[in-house]
Amino acid sequence: MKKSFLLVAFALLVGAIAANAQGGGNFPRRTVEERVQTIHEKMDSAFKLDKANLLQVDSVFATYYRGTDKVREELMASGGDRSTMRQQMQEKTQPLMDARDKELAAVLGADNFKIWKDAVEPTLRRGGPPRQ
């Protein structure tokens, strides 16, 4: 009796762990403010910007993130398959990214903007920097 109880309890524990591990990517989406805070910390540590410039950077990224969220919501509402939605997302957010980069280049200057594009921005993508 005791052995069968332990066996059943162990099986339930293993099943619960396996089911939990399958949850995958069902994480709640971070808010605009949380994402801006991440950028704020990266910019502050990478460039040591003054308060006024950091506020401008925060504003630029808040506008960008709100725009991409709006595009994502529109695409999710329209439905469709994942690969088509991904392609449309890239096409529709490219103008937002170009505007963000233009404003960011004005705030940071050419040298710091190049550092941003080459070294800092890749660390913000999912999974960290690109693998080799």
Image: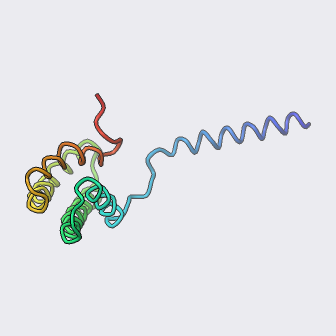
Residue 76, image x, y percentages: 29, 56
Picture residue at 20% right of the left edge, 62% below the top = 64
Picture residue at 43% right of the left edge, 47% below the top = 25
Q: Which of the two residues, 126 or 9, is positioned nearer the viewer here?
A: 126
15 w.r.t. 65: above or below? above
Picture residue at 84% right of the left edge, 39% below the top = 5
Residue 34, image x, y percentages: 36, 63
Q: Which of the two residues, 73 or 130, is positioned nearer the viewer here?
A: 130
Residue 22 located left or right of residue 64:
right
Picture residue at 21% right of the left edge, 67% below the top = 50
Residue 127, image x, y percentages: 35, 41
Residue 8 located left or right of residue 23:
right
Q: Which of the two residues, 107 or 11, is positioned nearer the viewer here?
A: 107
Residue lying furthest top in this view? 132
Residue 67, image x, y percentages: 21, 63
Q: Quadrant of the C terminus?
A: top left
Q: Could you tell me how many numbered marks the image carries?
A: 0
Q: Quadrant of the N terminus?
A: top right
> How is the structure coloured here?
rainbow
Q: Which of the two residues, 119 or 68, is positioned nearer the viewer here?
A: 119
32 w.r.t. 115: above or below? below
Residue 1 located left or right of residue 110:
right
